[in-house]
Image: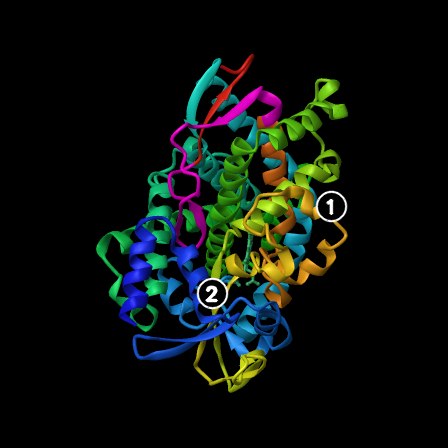
Amino acid sequence: MLYLLLGASKAESSGNLLHFFHGLFAEAGAETMEHYLLGLYGIDTKDPDCVDAVLNTRFTDFALGDRQRAFEPLLGDGIFTQDGAAWKKSRDMLRPQFMQTRTKSFPFIQQEVEGLIETLSQVVRKDASIDLQPMFFQLTLDTTLAVLCGRSSINSMTTEHASGFTEAFEYAQSRLMLRSRLGPFYWLANNRRFRESCEIVRSFAEQVVQEALQKHAEYSTNDTSDRYIFLHDLIKTNQDPVVLRDQLINILLAGRDTTACLLSWVFKFLARHQDIQEELRNASLDLESHRAGNLPTVGEIKSMKLLENVLHESLRLYPSVPINIREAVKDTELPRGGGLNNQSPIFIRKGQAVGYSLYSMHRLERFWGADNETFRPSRWEEASIKDCRKAYAPFNAGPRLCPGQEFALLEAGYTVVRILQTFDYMKELENEPKEFKHSITLVVAPQNGCKVRLGTGKSF
Ligand code: HEM
């Protein structure tokens, strides 16, 4: 047990925690293994059939465990933390809005990404070293907020409730991570700054909801705007301010960092793989819209095969939520991992935790081959990729499949294309280590940010 705790702590500070967990599977020589930690036995798996059982075929045998209690001060009661009937009710309630977001969120994506391009163009006159990661976190916060409640940039908001929102949201989230790691001892992480940060975020969300409720009558009768706003639509079916506030914060949390991390990893890979970057830039410059002096369309972004492959391959190597956990709500079993040869079903006791690593599943040699650690978007063109699909689940699987998937891929894809169209080159900094380092909160981000050299004209 000590080996596990010390090893994990050392690996975390050197930006290698996921590699460390990955190595534990190799040491055990198994895809599913038992661990003993803080007096509790748990199961860890990277076996696609076991992950599928937890998320899909035996979905009702598992729940989120301590997540609801640990996250409650910030998230209240919403889709991301609920289980059972309450979760089903939220999922059904929000389904129509997520369906609409798929097709109608594009004007907000365009608006916010164009803001980012303008800022970048001011900073990078000709050539500059720049950390894109904080910009991606701001972008995804602004875009998700805009789609949810019609507000464009949190920075441009002058209300008393908006001030300090970003900082409070980020701090509260970092404490949620600590609380979830503490398991049943989550309540120990409850300092004053955490409580105040939760209060700032909730007050802001309450204010947004109040304004929307006041205008409710207006947009039910006079809904002429070409912009689809999630909250305005949701209000047509539910006017409970607490429900609306909590769902808003839940979706913001689920949608913001995940997409920002994807963007950071994509740009790190593109800066390292100049040939792929060049090919993708050429495809972006070659779009009909660009040649006509216009912005890319949804149809164009969705039809760019190389772009899709780059996004898939980045999510394979660094799935935004790399490790996750469920808890058995009754005695059950997983299809493999038990018996002397690890091939028999394995018994899971009620209350036992099952951790699953997408990071490791996405690197299984029996699916992804000997070059499983290599960034190679072309693998998504090969015939064998259809057999790999069951070992790929960056957006989760089963009934809790991420409802923001299409929106996230559109936002990330559009951002990639616009940055490549705007700048003639992007290079890795010289001191970038060979192995990327990462840091883990609820999501996995590059540990040292996404620092690159961007420029226009000839590279030097
Ligand atoms: C690259 C971007 C994204 C990735 C990789 C991602 C991944 C995931 C994963 C793995 C889960 C399951 C978490 C769990 O059950 O423990 C999830 C759930 C969820 N995601 Fe995403 N997500 C992304 C973007 C978004 C966006 C942009 C939104 C909304 C605007 C969103 C909304 C949600 C919601 C509401 C849930 C909870 C669904 C439920 O429990 O029924 N996600 N996502």
Ligand 1 lies in quarter? bottom right
Q: Is residue 182 visible?
A: yes
The location of residue 370, given as percent across then percent down, is 60, 53
**Residue occupying the point 34% across, 70% down:** 183
Task: Give the residue pinned by disc 1.
Answer: 381
In the picture provided, is 47 more to the left or to the right than 191?
Answer: right
Q: Is residue 431 magenta?
A: yes
Q: Is residue 222 visible?
A: no
Task: Identify the disc placed on residue 26.
Answer: 2
Where 229 sits versus 127, above or below? below
Residue interval drawn in magenta: 420-449
* Contact, mark 2 vs mark 1 (Cβ under 8 Å): no
Q: Amino acid at mark 1?
A: Glu
Q: Tell me the residue at 38%/31% (across/down).
A: 431
Quadrant containing the N terminus is bottom left
Q: Report helix, strand or loop for mark 1.
A: helix
- Of 215 and 426, nearer the camera is 426
